[in-house]
Amino acid sequence: MELIIFLIIGALAGFAAGLFGVGGGTIIVPLLFIVFTQMGYPADNIMHLALGTSLATIIVTSISSLMAHNKRDAVMWPVFKNLVPGLAIGCFLGAGIAGQISGLYLQLIVGIFLLWVAYKMFVGGKNKADSSASNTNAVLPSKPKQLAAGGVIGIASAIFGIGGGSLTVPYLTRYGVVMQKAVGTSAACGLPISIAGALGFMIFGMQAQVNVPNTIGFVHIYAFLGISIMSFFTAKIGAKVAHILSPQLLKKCFAVLLTVVGCYFLYKGLF
């Protein structure tokens, strides 16, 4: 029965990710939080399990996304190589930091993050359109600064349970990288982020001795399998539907959804 529930979550998360053009983490974390709560898991472990499992599922979807973007020559591999060490180390350490934060505070942090993403989607459509016309001669910071930026993005990605697209894309476009290459490079960066984050949540979760069945540390195995399998297929369906509907309307609808979920997390955390 559990596996069926997670297959449904995967179908919804994949479809929404493809439809709205965002990482699945913003969908998976809230859904897993609700499901794990209904399953009666320990309250202080629920948010950690949602974050760790979300990052694990992103491993599968990021591979698919990376291959698709690489075929279109949209991945800036030199930039990727500069960012990867910081991303991986930062995300692993971020998992450790998240493990030390109580479930209550994690709810508040993720709630605020979702509201921020919703706000950016409400007001950022015009900016994104402008970014696609950015100067192709991008001037990025030095390698040490890119390494440091990767570390910050990695830590934040672990705490928010995301693949980093919400942070990597704005970072690259800020320095003049065209939108297509920013998205493609961000997709590539999602792989080391998700691998390091998932390993971190597994290791630190095992140290915390999580008393939840079918888990390795803070990663739920059934949830990982069900969501990964279904999201891989339904993301393609969502992407096709997105081309039929108005992109701006889709973004605003998703922003409303994120606002509701963000407020829900804040409510649960405060009350």
Image (tube, grey):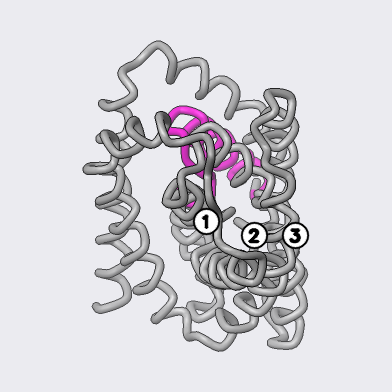
Give the residue furthest to the top: 244
Labels 3, 1: front one = 3
Which residue position is annotated with label 3?
195
**Earlier-in-chain disc, 2 versus 1:** 1
Q: How far apart are marks 2 and 3 (CA)?
A: 11 Å
Q: Residues within 10 Å of mark 3 (few under 14, many from 20)?
A: many
Q: Residues within 10 Å of mark 2 (few under 14, many from 20)?
A: many
In percent of width and height, residue 186 lies at: 59, 46
Which residue position is annotated with label 2?
53
Label 3 SS: helix
Q: Which amino acid does label 3 sit on?
A: Ile
Identified at 58% across, 70% down, the residue is: 145
Question: Magenta stretch?
Answer: 2-27
**Earlier-in-chain disc, 2 versus 3:** 2
Label 2 SS: helix
User: Between residues 68 and 64, which one lies in front from this camera angle?
Assistant: 68
Which residue position is annotated with label 1?
32
Q: What residue type is labelled 1?
A: Leu
Q: In this view, does 189 lie above or below 85?
A: above
**Mainly helix, strand or loop, the magenta region?**
helix
Task: Examine the rendering and report whether any part of residue 50 can be seen.
Answer: no
Task: Examine the rendering and report whether any part of residue 26 can be seen.
Answer: yes
User: Between residues 72 and 196, which one lies in front from this camera angle?
Assistant: 72
Q: Do the residues labelled 2 and 1 touch (CB within 8 Å)?
A: yes
Name the disc covering residue 234, or none.
Answer: none
In percent of width and height, residue 104 lies at: 40, 80
Q: Is residue 141 magenta?
A: no
